[in-house]
Amino acid sequence: MSNNYLNYITDKHLLKCIANLHNSYLKAKGNLSKKSLYKNKIDTIKLTFDSKFNDIDEKSLIETEILRQIDKSINNSLGTFHEEILGGVNGYERGNLSGFDVKAADNTMFADIKNKHNTMNSSAAESLFQKLATYADTYKQATCYWVQILAKNSFNTKWAGIINGKEYSHSRVHKISGDKFYALITLQDDALLQLYKVLPRAIDDYLKTLNASKEALVNSALSEIKEEISKSNRTILDQITFENFSYYRGFDKL
């Protein structure tokens, strides 16, 4: 197995992880119809301010909103990307819906990986602590980690504190930043930096292998809105406002 990109995982594994994430991007783009765009209602009053104060035309504004919604669905896939990368390091494996994201093959380490430090509310944090503590109690030699890939600092510390009014602490339940966790798994202090630096080249190499006839799925939201505009002669924002809030008094006259 070749290691032209990173010495802690094979080239084949890295490219497979990139391919899986690329497929998530394609799926997210292709799934965004007008119906899904409107699912949580569009704040067109805010978009009006954005358009005027930031000097952005309405078409660009909606394209940005579409990209924002696609980005929301991609964040979970980025956490999966890191799970897959680290699960390919010798001596470790992915959980595959087993209750943990990554673990040591000898059960001395269990980890739950979040891409960002602020993705959990207090109930989710409490549930995660309890789950990690259960693994630690079951496997007496195991240290269990809440991994924050994008953390506010670089750290590896015992996770202790008050969550939902209850005090939680366990000698082998830790929280750890992304750089420290990559270093822990690979035994290389700059392992996450290595991944960051090699990604542009690896992604380019992956994209070159794609079949030229394979076209990216294109979301239909904007084209559907434009089609309605051609019939209604409304502006883009008026059309979106009408379609989201026509049941508000007077909005059906837009």
Image (cartoon, helix red, strand yellow):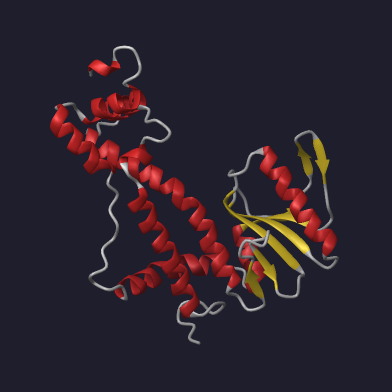
Q: Is residue 31 left or right of residue 182?
A: left
Q: Give coordinates of residue 190: x percent, y percent.
A: 57, 68
Q: Give coordinates of residue 223: x percent, y percent.
A: 22, 43
Query: Looking at the picture, does residue 252 appear above or below residue 94?
Result: above
Q: Is residue 220 left or right of residue 10?
A: left
Residue 158 in view in this figure: no
- Residue found 60% across the figure and 47% down from its top: 117
Q: Is residue 127 left or right of residue 86?
A: right
Query: Looking at the picture, does residue 157 appear above or below residue 120?
Result: below
Report the label total.
0
- Residue found 29% across the figure and 17% down from its top: 251
Quarter of the image for the C terminus: give it. top left
Query: Looking at the picture, does residue 33 appear above or below residue 181?
Result: above
- Quadrant hosting residue 133: bottom right
Q: Give coordinates of residue 230: x percent, y percent.
A: 13, 33
- Quadrant hosting residue 19: bottom left
Q: Is residue 128 left or right of residue 228?
A: right
